[in-house]
Image: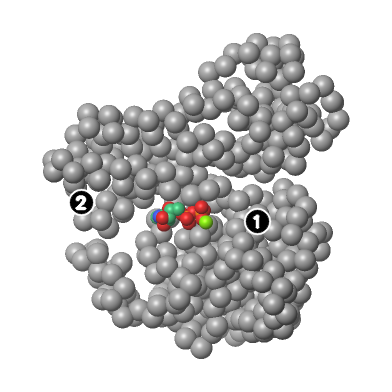
């Protein structure tokens, strides 16, 4: 072969054929159909994928598999170089008209009855806390029923679960007009089901839900204890799943922590991709706040934006609330918001969120409820594993978000010694290092506690 005249396309083709036989059809459609052979260079093949999302995923999932196959087939090391090439025309430049992107009329978007059009991908600010959930949601919207199915998005209150879930619905509604999309909260699903049974319209209910192409159910943490509804959802799930329909759920915690959920429904939720949303870090909070400021066409100086983001760390909903409060004030008095004004106006807000108003009883109550126990259990003497662990978590949280001393905490937890409290906190810290689920659980509990203390 002449220098500069390499052609490995035949190996690429054969590697694809062989890999197709060793992975599922769904995977092949999703990933390999989106890779395009571009050309060969010395010891490498250049392929293109539609976005950096695909690039990352393909690299992680298949790169070593493909290169291994190429080596096997050609007897030489051929590496893969992935470039991004968007097949669709680039989106129109929107920079100078930021508000157009949120003005539905301007784009003549179709409006789905159950969906809020403002919950779309363009308005969702990405950060490391939410990026995987965002990418998975985006992939589902582009390939409903094929990319990830089922999918569960979980995370604490105000972190964007409903926003992402509805963004999937909105995007599918634009791009696949023929698909039937249903968005419903688990609570509404439950109420509709109960009503249908009462009115002898079970059949209609089944018809409505089993003919859906994309089923989006929000807040499934509402389901525990609702035995018949769970049963119905289980059958709905199976019918849709078998027909390759897209199923997406949200939950305020990992499914493994939902009590009173039937095992078979739990295993369905856990079957597919489970992705979490974490609280945003400072940079992401600032990016989100700036986006909201831009969307509202208002002016807030950087110092004030910084003050808000430094102090409100809980979730995006709280950031929005703070902004709304400042705006209401600024409109009322008709003057620019200075740092002093912001500090004064948001004072309660900030202190609440530092946990100063949180009582020991409230922490015990929230933690106990979360684990299906009573406050008495948490404070009491029992030392069974099912109680000791939640008790240690409650102690840890108390030390983390309040100013109570270990002695005071010990007293409030059934008159225990302060060394017991220290030991409990140490145990939880150690455990967090090995159990990656624990920290999100604790953050989630802290959010619930703060929310309940407002
Ligand atoms: P959840 O359902 O998890 O409680 P929501 O989806 O209702 O939270 O989000 C709360 C608010 O915060 C909504 O107004 C939503 O648009 C906004 N929000 C959440 N995450 C983001 C984000 N990453 N970028 C922009 N807005 C966000
Ligand atoms: Mg929600």
- Which-is-in-front pick, marks 2 and 1? 1
Assess disc 2: are there few (<14), some (14-19) or many (≥20) residues with their C-alpha within 10 Å of its C-alpha.
few
Colour basis: one colour
Q: Earlier in the sequence, mark 2 or mark 1?
A: 1
Left or right: 89, with 432 as reference point: left
| Along the viewing direction, whichever of 43 and 60 lies nearer the viewer | 60
Q: Position of residue 373 (x, y in %)?
A: 76, 37
Q: Position of residue 228 (x, y in %)?
A: 77, 66
Tag 1's secondary structure?
A: helix
Assess disc 1: are there few (<14), some (14-19) or many (≥20) residues with their C-alpha within 10 Å of its C-alpha.
some
Q: Residue at x 44, y 77 (%)?
A: 112
* In the image, the residue with mark 2 has its CB under 8 Å from the nearest atom of ligand 1: no
The residue carrying mark 1 is: 222
Q: Residue at x 45, y 76 (%)?
A: 113
In the rendered image, which quarter is residue 180 located in?
bottom right
Left or right: 293, with 316 as reference point: left
Q: Position of residue 319 (x, y in %)?
A: 38, 44
Residue 298 is labelled as 2
Q: Position of residue 207 (x, y in %)?
A: 67, 84
Is residue 405 visible in the rendered image? The answer is: yes
Left or right: 361, with 137 as reference point: right
- How many numbered circles does the render carry? 2
**Distance between the Cα atoms at labels 2 and 1?**
38 Å
């Amino acid at each position: 072969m002449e220098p500069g005249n390499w052609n490995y396309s035949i190996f690429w083709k054969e590697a694809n054929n062989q890999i197709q036989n060793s992975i599922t059809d769904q995977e092949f459609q999703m990933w390999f159909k989106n890779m395009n052979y571009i050309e060969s260079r010395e010891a490498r093949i250049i392929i293109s994928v539609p976005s950096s999302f695909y690039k990352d995923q393909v690299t992680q999932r298949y790169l070593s598999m493909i290169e291994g196959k190429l080596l096997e087939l050609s007897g030489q090391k051929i590496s893969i170089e992935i470039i991004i090439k968007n097949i669709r025309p680039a989106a129109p430049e929107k920079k100078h008209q930021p508000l157009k992107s949120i003005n539905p009329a301007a784009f003549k978007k179709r409006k789905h009855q159950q969906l809020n059009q403002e919950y779309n991908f363009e308005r969702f600010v990405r950060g490391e806390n939410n990026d995987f959930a965002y990418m998975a949601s985006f992939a589902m919207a582009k390939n409903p029923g094929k990319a990830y199915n089922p999918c569960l998005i979980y995370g604490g209150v105000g972190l964007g679960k409903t926003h992402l879930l509805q963004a999937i619905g909105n995007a599918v509604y634009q791009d696949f007009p023929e698909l039937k999309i249903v968005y419903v909260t688990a609570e509404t699903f439950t109420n509709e089901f109960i009503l249908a049974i009462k009115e002898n319209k079970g059949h209609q209910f089944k018809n409505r839900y089993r003919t859906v192409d994309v089923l989006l159910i929000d807040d499934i943490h509402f389901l525990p204890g609702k035995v018949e509804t769970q049963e119905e959802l289980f059958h709905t799930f199976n019918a849709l799943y078998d027909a390759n329909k897209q199923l997406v759920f949200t939950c305020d915690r990992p499914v493994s922590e939902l009590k009173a959920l039937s095992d078979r429904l739990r295993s369905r939720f856990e079957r597919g991709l489970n992705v979490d949303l974490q609280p945003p870090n400072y940079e992401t909070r600032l990016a989100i706040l700036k986006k909201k400021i831009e969307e509202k066409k208002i002016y807030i100086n950087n110092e004030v934006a910084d003050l808000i983001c430094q102090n409100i760390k809980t979730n995006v909903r709280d950031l929005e609330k703070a902004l709304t409060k400042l705006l209401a004030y600024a409109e009322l008095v008709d003057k620019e918001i200075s740092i002093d004004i912001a500090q004064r106006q948001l004072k309660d807000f900030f202190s609440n969120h530092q946990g100063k108003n949180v009582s020991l009883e409230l922490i015990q109550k929230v933690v106990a409820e979360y684990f299906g126990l009573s406050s008495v259990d948490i404070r009491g003497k029992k030392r069974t594993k099912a109680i000791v662990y939640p008790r240690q978590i409650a102690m840890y949280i108390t030390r983390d978000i309040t100013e109570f001393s270990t002695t005071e905490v010990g007293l409030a937890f059934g008159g225990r010694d302060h060394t017991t409290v220290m030991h409990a906190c140490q145990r939880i810290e150690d455990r967090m290092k090995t159990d990656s689920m624990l920290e999100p659980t604790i953050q989630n509990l802290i959010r619930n506690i703060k929310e309940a203390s407002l």
